Image (tube, rainbow, N blue to C red):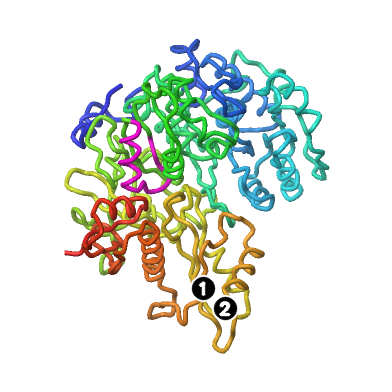
Amino acid sequence: MAGFRTLADVRAIEAEMPYAARGIPRTMHRFLSAVAETHGSRPAISFQLMSGPNDKAMTLTWGQVLAQVTQAANLFRRLGIGPGDAVAFVLPNALETAVTLIGGAVAGIVAPINPLLEPAQIAAILRETRAKVVVTLKPFPHSEVAQKVSRALEEAPGVTHVLEVDLAPYLSGLKRWIAPLLRPRVRHRHRAQLLDFAAALATAGAEALEFDDPEDDRVAAYFHTGGTTGMPKVAQHRVSGMIYNGWLGQMLLFRETDNVLCPLPLFHVFAAYPILMSMVASGGHAIFPTPAGYRGEGVFDNLWKLIARWKITYLIAVPTALSALMQRPIDADISTLRGTFSGSAPLPIELYKRFEAATGVQVVEGYGLTEATCLVSVNPPEGVKKIGSVGLPFPYTRVRIVTADAQGGPRDCGLDEVGEICVASPGVSVGQTYTETDKNTGLYWGDFLRTGDLGRLDGDGYLFITGRAKDLIIRGGHNIDPALIEEAMMSHPAVAFAGAVGQPDAQAGELPCVYVELVKGATATVEELSEHARKRIPERAAHPKHLEILSELPKTAVGKVRKPDLRILAITRVLNAALSQSGLTVRIQDVVEDRKRGLLARIPRHTDPDEAVRACLGQFAVAWDWLA
């Protein structure tokens, strides 16, 4: 493993030879074959249905993963999947999920879909990706995945076959026999043919692909952009970008002896690429606890014990998970743990410090996005980790901080000057980021993808994210489009204007809140408007956690609602409430736009102890400082 500590180390890796000349396999099947040849008997992927440290677990070696992926790819081809056809999966985590993800990319284009989405959204993604085959769950107690997919298929007539994965074999003892008896009945009104995944897989060849596997780079995955509301955009990922993510993991992060605990979903790029592809490249071992990962019953209560059980070297997390873990005592031997990787949302400084103090290992924060096939930058595991930054750009990735010049063209910002983060890498496909062609218009400056995130680069090359040009609300790593909340509020006859923003939250990073202005002469109560929102916003995650009526919303010169002003209101309200609940008397003086740090809450020094104030405000991913 070639680690890196500084930007100079990154440049040295690049200078060693061009990326294209490194002899990296150019097809997904050959990529997987290489690790099976070298580490075939080593554990590759483990999964346990229940979260207990002694509960039944099942493991595939790399040789077995290759065999099952080969079977899956051959099966998908028999079912009519060609290189340009989509195999969708609507699955929680399981061994079959990983096999489908890789096998679908070998046979055609794999399209992971969040099983938490509503049937109409699932159907919309199936139509957008033109999926022919869907892999999903067989009806199972306490799960509604099969029911939702069945309803979605009524609106996706292009799907010809549905392969059902049965979770019952992951159970043991009496539960394994009782679960099938408790299956909910699902009335299918679609025309797709239903097949049992395991039985169908067994009919396909495991020794070799039954079709040509050309080295031409092609689109091999469709990942929707993670929204919990509305119709998510669908990003296209090429084989080269998927393998690039894995190569980075092998080169810079993981060894074949690593055991990586990943309670994140495989329908998300974080688990699919930096983790699963990195395991394929390095020969490491990925462990997925429960179908729902961190959402699974008992996962947080048992996580320290799971680290001990599997001798985990790296934990994969998001800030909300780390916050929940810090509320539980460390009740197991976690001495094998060398580090924790965190992404998807900003990490509060106080949480970083608390986790390091409690575990003795540092949190390594990074940055990636679906549109760039994930990885962009990381705080070097063996180098300086600048708290508040997302680290150094990976080798062969270039980051520009850009703002518009007087003519509307791109101008590169200077050191520590805030602008839009733009990325070029083997994971960026210029002109082909989204399946919908019109969504790619204006998305690039030259060969650089415009991320919509605001940030700056310091003198050491570290990237800092200071805000978002996009207005998305990020709740625990899930994107919520504020327009969905605003449209729901505007449907009330008493509402003239509505502005939804994310308010800081110590657990979720952000929670949706909305401010409204009433029609002149109209009356409405907060309770009435909140009930109106609950009825018209289908996803609970997007329900506003705070609704406030203002006499007038702040607006721009052209009459648009000024979101930064609303964010200032939300930051002030939430932080002041936290100070009060902590028994402190000091309050936020103001919130200003800082050139380097984005929105910055300022607080006067007070009789309250400085450490108590730091501990309170450090829970939030909000920049703050003392007044001079």
The location of residue 66, given as percent across then percent down, is 55, 18
The secondary structure type at the circle numbered 2 is strand
* Quarter where residue 314 is shown: top left
Which residue is depicted at the point 39% across and 56% down?
A: 452
Residue positioned most to the bottom: 521
Image: magenta residue range: 341-359
Residue holding disc 2: 495
Depth check: give the residue in front, 242 or 383: 383
The secondary structure type at the circle numbered 1 is strand
Residue holding disc 1: 498
Residue 344 is a magenta residue: yes
Tell me the quarter of the image containing the C terminus: bottom left
**Cβ–Cβ under 8 Å for marks 1 and 2:** yes
Image height of 415 relative to 322, above or below: below
Q: How far apart are marks 1 and 2 (CA)?
A: 7 Å
How crowded pointer 1 is (Cα within 10 Å; few <14, some 14-19, many 20+) is rated as many
* Quarter where residue 209 is shown: top right
How crowded pointer 2 is (Cα within 10 Å; few <14, some 14-19, many 20+) is rated as some
Q: Which amino acid does label 1 sit on?
A: Ala
- Asked whether residue 76 appears in the rendered view, the answer is yes
- Asked whether residue 281 appears in the rendered view, the answer is no
Depth check: give the residue in front, 176 or 34: 176
The circle drawn on residue 549 is: none
The location of residue 328, given as percent across then percent down, is 45, 37
Q: Which amino acid does label 2 sit on?
A: Val
Depth check: give the residue in front, 356 or 126: 356
Residue positioned most to the top: 41
Tell me the quarter of the image containing the N terminus: top left
Which residue is depicted at the point 48% across and 52% down?
A: 475
* Quarter where residue 22 is shown: top left
Residue 4 is a magenta residue: no
The location of residue 508, given as percent across then percent down, is 46, 50
